[in-house]
Amino acid sequence: MHELVEKMQNKEIRAVAKAITMVENDHPDKLSLLSDVFSFTRNARYIGITGSPGAGKSSLVNQLITHIRSKNLTVAVIAVDPTSPFSGGALLGDRVRMNQHFTDDGVFIRSMATRGSLGGLARATKDALRICDAYGFDVVIVETVGVGQSELDIMKVVDTTAVVLTPNSGDVLQIFKAGIMEIADLFVINKADLPGVGKLRGLLKDLVMMAATDNHMTAIVKTIATEQQGIEELWGKMEEHQEHLYHTAEGKRKREIQQELEVYELIREEIWRDVKSFVEQHDKASQITTDRDPYRLALEWFERWKKEGGSH
Amino acid sequence: MHELVEKMQNKEIRAVAKAITMVENDHPDKLSLLSDVFSFTRNARYIGITGSPGAGKSSLVNQLITHIRSKNLTVAVIAVDPTSPFSGGALLGDRVRMNQHFTDDGVFIRSMATRGSLGGLARATKDALRICDAYGFDVVIVETVGVGQSELDIMKVVDTTAVVLTPNSGDVLQIFKAGIMEIADLFVINKADLPGVGKLRGLLKDLVMMAATDNHMTAIVKTIATEQQGIEELWGKMEEHQEHLYHTAEGKRKREIQQELEVYELIREEIWRDVKSFVEQHDKASQITTDRDPYRLALEWFERWKKEGGSH
């Protein structure tokens, strides 16, 4: 068993941070580490929080942490910023939250970014979720900065995604972005003391009605995170959705699709690592010049790798 | 030679549209088509226009088209929307522009989106640029909707990238986004009749000074696209940057890095296509279940493909 996984079983939280760093940096031992990690996963609840910048996601997550802790559950938060190549720092208001929960062993907060990760940030996020799960956290929350394509991709690795909106005109437009309705398992109207909340709620209700299936309709929850309002209802709806997922064919299908995509992506990464080192060993520098046809070059290397590199 | 490339040489514009569709849909013959396309590329100027939504990019591109046509050069525009899975439609104000330039054979406008493309949208955009180049367009412009990570990636495939900003507070923040300074070959302050233009220009100047190298400093151009102001200067600066690229070691290095990345990506795609069909032929459905370790499964399939599939 990998040393870090052993340390995680001994409740050494630094091993979690180190394992996530290995994933971020795409360490060569990544797959074997993660395979060991996988054997210790115990089905933590994977929750995603996304929404436009300024929607109050950080405050909301902060309040959720407090609420989840009051239920005697432990919680890890992975804060992901697809727009930044840096990580481990003070992204997404981490410092504020760290101060509040710093002395609590039941809370772990970590930022992730695009640095190094071969398979992309969504892939690395899934690995980080499993690492937190294997350590023993009951709930793992993924928080992203916005609702761009990268954020939508990241949300595909969790079970329950909450899309946070506020009652202002800019936010309303976010709902109509391609892909938002597909990933939203529940909508949160935060800053629900602002004017326009009725209008936003009405609009969301109409959209949710149209997208509803026989046995499921996306919930809408109003919160005022800064005043701790609506947090209990929000957590309740999150738990309801998790129940729904684990007891319906729809949920089973969702997990199967995730799993299939994941295996494909992992194979792709592994091949990529192999080909890259093969080409690098064979003096690519003299081959790749700007006047040579890149398409033919790619086909040639592919054939050569299959013959010489694919069998070792 | 591929039939479509032959038709492109006979100046059949529909062949361009069809070739781009093949790239979008990741057609199996893609690499051989593109290899033929590559042999006809004649170094069209590849220009990128990016900036936050509402910065007036569409009007600006429209004015640029008119200006470029007045120089007796032909121009193709590839409008890319990474947030939308659909394409070929009326994205990014295409209809308006189509109406204006519809009867002009020297102008081609096409939307692209993420649909189907294995190698991602940046990869497909590069292929589309080459297709337009091989047909004979003198200038090819890539326009994106925003400044998210996907847009930044797309901008890496062009030679000259203009980042369009407007004098309002939201736009100023865009400059500080990770990656913007790295891709900006020139800044355009559009809507330069709005208040705050002096402040934005001052801020940009400071940033540009800090990032300047011995032989190059990013230009800043003020435009009012809706009144055709500043367009001539903008085109001039674009031409200057292209000159700079083709006559300096910096430009040569940039193209070499692009080429190297491109060959790697193409090899990766090709392998991926091969592995995917291999796994699909070997009844993956019975193997991939949610309780099986995806990391071990990936390693197993990879090894199996190398043994059995890698050599056929």
Image (cartoon, coloured by chain):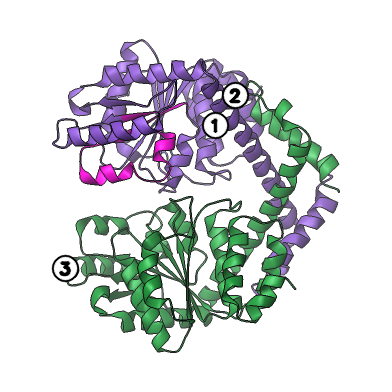
Chain colours: A purple, B green
Q: Report the number of discs.
A: 3
Q: Nearer the viewer, residue A26 or A58?
A: A58
Q: Is residue B236 left or right of residue B39?
A: left
Q: Position of residue B113 (x, y in %)?
A: 49, 56
Give the residue number, with chain letter if any, for mark 3.
B194
| Residue shown at the point (74%, 62%) measured from the top left | A283
Q: Are marks 2 and 3 in contact (CB under 8 Å)?
A: no
- Counting residues from the start of the chain, the first of labels 2 and 1 encountered is 2
| Residue A129 in view of the camera | yes
Amino acid type at mark 3 = Leu
Q: Nearer the viewer, residue B211 or A223?
A: A223
Q: Are marks 3 and 1 in contact (CB under 8 Å)?
A: no
Give the residue number, with chain letter if any, for mark 1.
A127
Give the residue number, with chain letter if any, for mark 2.
A37
Pick out the residue farthest to the top: A72
| Residue interval drawn in magenta | A159-187
Query: Do callouts 3 and 1 point to residues on the same chain?
Result: no
Relative height, residue A248 to residue A77 (above, below): above
Q: In the rendered structure, does residue A183 fall within the stretch colored magenta?
A: yes
Relative height, residue B4 to residue B286 (above, below): below
Relative height, residue B41 to residue B22 (above, below): below
Distance from Cα at disc 2 to Cα at disc 3: 56 Å
- Report in which chain the residue with disc 1 lies: A
Q: In the rendered structure, does residue A274 fall within the stretch colored magenta?
A: no
Q: Are marks 2 and 1 in contact (CB under 8 Å)?
A: yes
Distance from Cα at disc 3 to Cα at disc 1: 47 Å
